[in-house]
Amino acid sequence: MFFTEKKFTKVLDKYNYNFKTNDIIAGTIFSQEHEGYLVDIGNNKAAYLPKAEILLSNKNDPNINIHDTREFFILVNDIETNQLILSLKRLKYIRAWDRIKQMKEEDIIVKAYVKGVNKGGILIEIEDIQGFIPNSHICYGKSKNQLYNTFISCKFLIANEYNNQLVLSNRCAVITNIIDKYNLKVGSIIISKIIKLTDFGIFFNIYNIPALMHKSEISSYYNNNTDNIFEVGKELPIQIRHLDIKQGRISISMTNIKN
């Protein structure tokens, strides 16, 4: 026996079910209006889905068709007019955040779409939620503009649904990969290229991650020969002192390397 819309309405009436704001319900789109759609939710009243409540991300296709049956989020329940305002966008938002929180909990590497750049870092999208990768968590090797409109590997730093705050790290993902690929560990000695000289230390390129060697970590031999030894582009042996996967940082040293 088929469960028809009329029978569904009788069940609702029998149990005196009241639709409430924040409920998730099933409905069938049956009419397109100028600024939205009418949805049959089986209570003898047509609910309304505004066009503004369809898309979570502008890059998506609305993909709305008459006779589609799907789930909706009740955004507003106007008791005076007995009118329900529905949202697909809010439902997608809730479920996207559920997936994001699960991925963060599992500490997995994800691919995020780079949708823009600014002075502070990279604007990304994941699960249609906008996030941010700060400059300090972007790997060395490519400019931010080169990353625009591409996908970048990253791991979650902050995922706060209530503040709509999503912060990720490209460096954390890369460090995780290179540890596995190159068997990198504390104490490993590798050859690395100098990419920047500063008053407080030297930055080396460790598999496209900028790693700072503080001046206190430079051996006495090199301290006495800095004019001849240290210049941008030169390759030198360095030792891994600390791997901070959670913050995407590598600390290095020369103090234990024999000259």
Image (tube, rainbow, N blue to C red):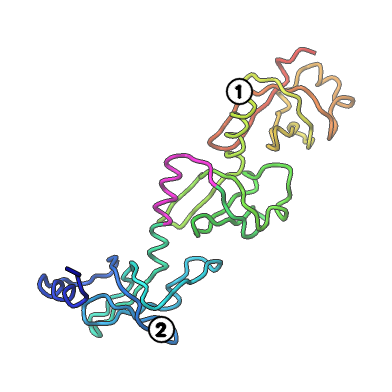
Q: Would you place residue 245 above or below residue 52 in this image? A: above
Residue corresponding to mark 1: 185
Near mark 1 (Cα within 10 A), the count class, few <14, some 14-19 or many ≥20, is some
Q: Secondary structure at mark 2?
A: strand
Q: In terms of depth relative to the viewer, which is nearer, 162 or 206?
A: 206
The disc at residue 216 is none
Amino acid, disc 2: Gln
At x 62%, y 52%, the residue is: 151
Mark closer to the chain start, 1 or 2: 2
Q: Residue at x 56, y 37 (%)?
A: 247
Nearer the observer, 177 or 165: 177
Label 1, label 2: how many angstroms apart (C-alpha)?
61 Å
Q: Quadrant of residue 140?
A: top right
Q: Magenta span: helix, strand or loop, mainly?
A: helix
Q: Which residue is mark 2?
A: 32
214, above or below 111, in the image: above
Q: Which residues are magenta?
A: 96-110
Left or right of 175, for residue 23: left
Taking the spot 24% from the left edge, 82% from the top edge, the residue there is 45
Q: Is residue 85 left or right of residue 128?
A: left
Q: Position of residue 194 (x, y in %)?
A: 79, 32
